[in-house]
């Protein structure tokens, strides 16, 4: 269902140490730049390619931009790992019993939309069942191609994904 027609989503509002201090609606959190939580899951295939999603043009943030394989807000009362499992199922139809392996943690900052983010890595081959209101389309990319595209056309990528890719490159986990 398009974001404008969904029941109001509630998020935990967190402090600078990621401790819950209150709850607010999605609209309030985004309108006031409140710190909250999100997950990103990077899905790689056996060939080492990364599946990226092109966000729906109806999204309230980064519409039409390329982004992590899966990304989503942690709901109020939910933990990061449960959110990663839920988002894999909801966005690309991938059912996993356990949360993927955590790879990277990002602090809440302007690039992440004031979200504390855990980044996970999942192995899967697809094909995937993409949620049409969330994802316009998806495609597999070689890591070196992502590095080149992010450098040449950064505006085509969500700011949070650009930051994730930069941090992975700094750690030697993505081509420079």
Image: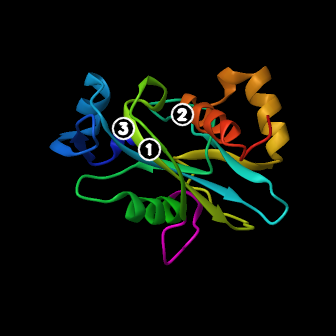
Assess disc 2: are there few (<14), some (14-19) or many (≥20) residues with their C-alpha within 10 Å of its C-alpha.
Answer: many
Residue at mark 3 to residue at mark 1: CA–CA distance: 24 Å
- Residue under pointer 2: 160
- Of tags 2 and 3, which is closer to the observer? 2
Q: Which mark is first along the chain, 2 or 1?
A: 1
Q: Residue at x 38, y 57 (%)?
A: 80
Q: Is residue 63 magenta?
A: no
* SS for callout 1: strand
Name of the residue lying farthest toward the left: 22
Labelled pair 1, 2 in contact (Cβ < 8 Å): yes
- Residue under pointer 3: 4
Q: Residue at x 28, y 43 (%)?
A: 18
Answer left or right for 32 relative to 145: left
- Residue under pointer 1: 117
Q: Which mark is first along the chain, 1 or 3?
A: 3
- Of tags 3 and 1, which is closer to the observer? 1
Range shown magenta: 91-100
Could you say which quadrant of the image residue 47 lies in? Answer: bottom right
Residue 136 is labelled as none
Answer left or right for 111 relative to 125: left
Could you say which quadrant of the image residue 123 lies in? Answer: bottom right
Answer left or right for 51 relative to 97: right
* Foreground residue among 134 and 21: 21
Dominant secondary structure (helix, strand or loop) of the stretch shown in magenta: loop
Assess disc 3: are there few (<14), some (14-19) or many (≥20) residues with their C-alpha within 10 Å of its C-alpha.
Answer: few
Q: Position of residue 84 (x, y in %)?
A: 46, 60
Q: Which mark is first along the chain, 3 or 2?
A: 3
Residue at mark 1 to residue at mark 2: CA–CA distance: 9 Å
Q: Quadrant of the C terminus?
A: top right
Q: How is the image coloured?
A: rainbow
Asked if residue 44 is positioned above or below residue 34 in the image, the reply reads: below
């Amino acid at each position: 269902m398009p974001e404008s027609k969904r029941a109001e989503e509630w998020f935990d509002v967190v402090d600078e140490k990621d401790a819950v201090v209150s709850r607010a609606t999605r609209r309030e959190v985004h309108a006031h730049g409140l710190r909250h939580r999100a997950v990103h899951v990077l899905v790689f295939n056996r060939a080492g390619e990364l599946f990226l999603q092109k966000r729906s043009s109806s999204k309230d943030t980064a519409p039409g931009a390329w982004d992590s394989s899966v990304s989503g807000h942690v709901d109020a009362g939910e933990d990061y790992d449960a959110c990663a499992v839920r988002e894999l199922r909801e966005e690309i139809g991938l059912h996993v019993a356990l949360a993927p392996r955590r790879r990277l943690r990002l602090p809440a900052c302007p690039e992440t939309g004031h979200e504390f983010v855990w980044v996970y890595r999942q192995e899967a081959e697809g094909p995937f069942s993409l949620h049409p209101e969330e994802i316009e389309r998806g495609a597999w990319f070689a890591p070196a191609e992502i590095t080149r595209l992010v450098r040449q056309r950064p505006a085509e990528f969500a700011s949070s994904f650009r930051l994730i890719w930069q941090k992975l490159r700094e750690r030697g986990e993505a081509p420079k």
